[in-house]
Amino acid sequence: MGNRLTKIYTRTGDDGTTGLGDGSRVDKTSARIEAMGDIDEVNSLVGLLLTLGTGAALREQLIDVQHALFDAGGELSLPGKLLITEKYVLRLEQAIDQYNSRLPALQEFILPGGSEAAAVCHLARAVCRRAERHLVQLGRTETTNPQTSIFLNRLSDLLFVVARCLAREQGGTEIYWDKGRLL
């Protein structure tokens, strides 16, 4: 691979537009760019989570997730390109089942937190849900890959289950929602 980015600033975005991978330019506030930005933010949060220490298997799983998120962003950068497939979704479902099998059944909603890593994981989950909403919004006006929305939906589920595991592994506790606590 040659040098893909030889110059970091180009000044072409100073007018409020940004370039897509196909050479077209779109407004920086378009639904496509919102979804791409959210996916980038999820990826960054997964990167932050990786700095907080995870087991080797989870680390590899999260690195795979980062690569898949880059694929999702690349797909959005190239309108009409399909990169996310059902295989991506199935891998997430397998991981969800694996991690969830270690956990007690939920009796109530839990509040985000539990440990530092779990809290970051919950934040990544919340941003992933936003990315999914923005992608669905984009799909209302432009053709998008339905597998990418499904992927983001499953990824948020995985991040929820992983947050629960991390809370336990790192000595934290889950705080259950106490409906009406302040009444």
Image (spheres, rainbow, N blue to C red):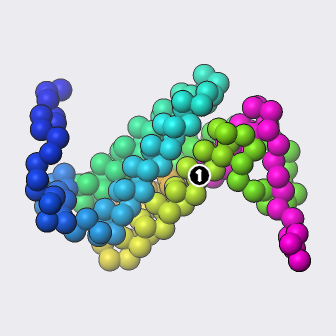
Residue 52 located left or right of residue 118:
left
Note whether residue 87 is visible.
no
| Residue for point 42% across, 57% down | 38
Asked which quadrant contains residue 28, the reply is bottom left
Asked whether 54 or 98 is in front, the reply is 54
Q: Quadrant of the N terminus?
A: top left
Q: Quadrant of the C terminus?
A: bottom right
Residue 69 located left or right of residue 154:
left
Query: What residue would you read off at disc 1?
Result: 123
Residue 77, compared with residue 61, is above or below; it is below
| Residue for point 38% across, 77% down | 140
Which region is colored magenta?
155-183
Is 73 magenta? The answer is: no
The image position of residue 29, as x and y in percent, is: 29, 69
| Residue for point 37% across, 43% down | 70
Residue 168, compared with residue 125, is above or below; it is above
Label 1 CA crowd tier, 10 Å (few <14, some 14–19, many 20+): many
Label 1 residue SS: helix
